[in-house]
Image (spheres, rainbow, N blue to C red):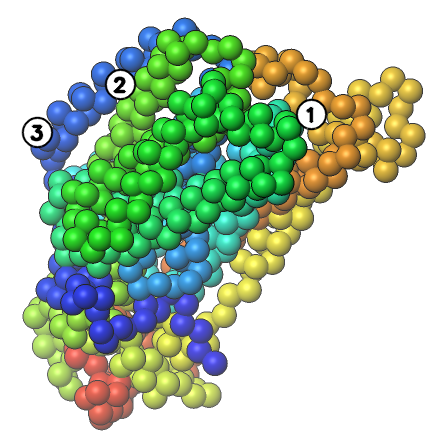
Amino acid sequence: MTERAFQPAAETVPLYGAPVIGPDETVASIAAALAGSVLAPPGRLWRLAVAGTLVPILVWAGLRSTVPAAFGPAAAAWWIGLAAGCLLISGLLLLAGVAWRCGIGRLAQTAALLCAGLAALYPVPVHPVSLGALLLASLGLWAAALLPDLAVLRDAAGPDRRRARLYRMLSAGWCGSALQWLAWERASRGFGLLGILAAVAVLIDLALAAALRTDRHDTLLPVALLVEAVLSGAGLIAALAMTLRRSRGLDGLITGRHLDILGRLLLAFGLAALYCHVTEIVTALLYGDAAERARLTRRLLGDEAPAFWILMLAGLLPTQLFWIPAIRRSALALGLIGALVAIGLGADHVLATRIGAIGAALADLLTAGIATLGSAGLFVLGLLLLFRLVPPVGIAETRQLALAQNAHAAPRVPETAPDARPGPFAVQTLAQPPGQPPGLIAIFASEAGLAEAARGLSGPRAPRLDAFGPVPMPEATAALHREERSLNRLALFGAFLGFAAFVAIRIAGLAGDMPDGPASVAALLARPLSWPDSWPNSWSTAWPTPWPAAWPLSWAMAAVPALSAAAAGGVLGLAVALLSVVRAGRAGRLPPAALAGHFILTIESSGAPFIPAALARRLNALPADAGRPLALYGLAAGEPQR
């Protein structure tokens, strides 16, 4: 059965008449718009935006030393929640293969990477392995998704030699061969799955840390943190998508369909988060003991009331406005409410750290809030710089969506190719590097036609065939009998090594802490997993209460960072496997750079007698809608290397 990963489903009835991609978008227009937005010189608006980020960055740098240490974990937890939420959304949409993900996928991946990096600037309330796995998984998914787009930028760089060299190095030899696309599809799914595991692990770690440091021990806490992470990530993506859509004129790629779906996503998860908090309140009123009711009173009317009501009025209740269709489909309303939700949900991390209960003054709360929002200047600066180097919307996935939705989206065959001259059997001749065997290059209107031609030329004495295209080609890959199994093996091997390394380091560290040596491996693993007091600005500086000597959840506390270590190892193994396959995909004849972005079948001798004229007759005899090429090029010696 042919595998069709990433194949967007063609939806015959668009939601409320809004298409998921503009009707005029084609393979060529998508590359021109997105590559042009990156390669064009920076405008005045971009320079003003960069200058504007300096103000909050300076505010953050100036106030950071005056903020009490207790606020650091809350700020780190806020950034971790945003990163985990964006990574969960990106990974789930990727694995589900929904058609509209390409408009917001790159935004979600970039936001996850930057938020995870900003969390590392604060004293993190989770195990460093969990945060490291989150950062590594975000980087792996972001970089893997960029590979085909970097090749488009490399080919479009033109006379800008510095940019061309940069993109040539970053694209790692990508040429769009069938083997490369097969590896890219599987690796992207693998990075998405590992990203989901890393995000869930870090949120569980965050919930366990909050349960240990506060009196919130209800079983709904991990679920609430997971729901709020997705909600805050969706709010951040909505704000970024609307800003990008307006500033870069990408209405054809981020359409009204995206507005409506993002509004519904915020509404759904806003309801789920409200359910978690209302359930907690009702449970405390009906079944809670004196301590739980005292905590509820403190949250509603006491020292935790400011954070609680900010959470409700800014983070959760505004999402209910999306019941109104006009608000849900308004770009301005969606952007503003999304930003408000992403900011307001940070108040729940203030509640989780019980900052109000440690005697923090209102001035300290305001200073900490201003400083934390000031660090958002670093986030915006990172976005501005990254989107000057890479496209803000994925080119490859958007092209695939355009081919599925727009009948006229297929790339057009160039009227003449470089150094082309007429030849027999309607075959134009292209020069080729000296010493290369004779061959043919056939151009097709679609992947289906290329696959039919490959099947028509296959046989026991068939020539050597390879396929190249602007999008993944599962049907052509199956016709060429391309297979790739090293990705899964290396990913599993890397995950096992990561898990084993964490366990070994953990046992060695515990053994070193015991003066008489370990009694047994079981005794070592039964000890709690704690953070060293020597770490700068760790949670121990804010909460000096030591952990119990025999904490009953020590297995759970050890399992979460172990899962994160396995995810990090899997990301590294998958990255090595993907790069090796991309390099291997360049083996053999490459089509000329002038034909990049087309569906191409290369045909060359495999040892049997090779007669280009006979092969051309066979291809031209195929039906027009089932394998006949739009153009054929023969290869003659003399072309310089690409």
Q: Secondary structure at mark 2?
A: helix
Q: Are marks 2 and 1 in contact (CB under 8 Å)?
A: no
Q: Secondary structure at mark 1?
A: loop
Q: What's the distance in space between the residues labelled 2 and 1, CA to CA?
A: 35 Å
Question: Which residue lies at the image location 26% right of the left edge and 73% below the top edge?
Answer: 11
Q: Secondary structure at mark 3?
A: helix
Q: Earlier in the sequence, mark 3 or mark 2?
A: 3
Mark 3 neighbour density, 10 Å: few (under 14) some (14–19) many (20 or more): few
Q: Nearer the viewer, residue 178 or 76?
A: 76
Q: Earlier in the sequence, mark 3 or mark 1?
A: 3
Q: What's the distance in space between the residues labelled 3 and 2, CA to CA?
A: 20 Å
Q: What's the distance in space between the residues labelled 3 and 1, CA to CA?
A: 50 Å
* Residue 127 seen by the camera: no
Question: Which residue lies at the image location 62% right of the left edge and 36% below the top edge?
Answer: 288
Residue holding disc 3? 44
Question: Which residue lies at the image location 57% right of the left edge and 59% below the top edge?
Answer: 488
Q: Amino acid at mark 2?
A: Pro
Residue 249 x/y as whole percent: 11, 47
Q: Quadrant of the C terminus?
A: bottom left
Residue 93 x/y as whole percent: 39, 57
> Can you say whether 575 is above or below 292 in the image?
below
Residue holding disc 2? 56
Q: Amino acid at mark 3?
A: Arg
Residue 5 x/y as whole percent: 41, 67
Q: Amino acid at mark 1?
A: Ser
Rendering quarter of residue 96? bottom left
Residue holding disc 1? 530
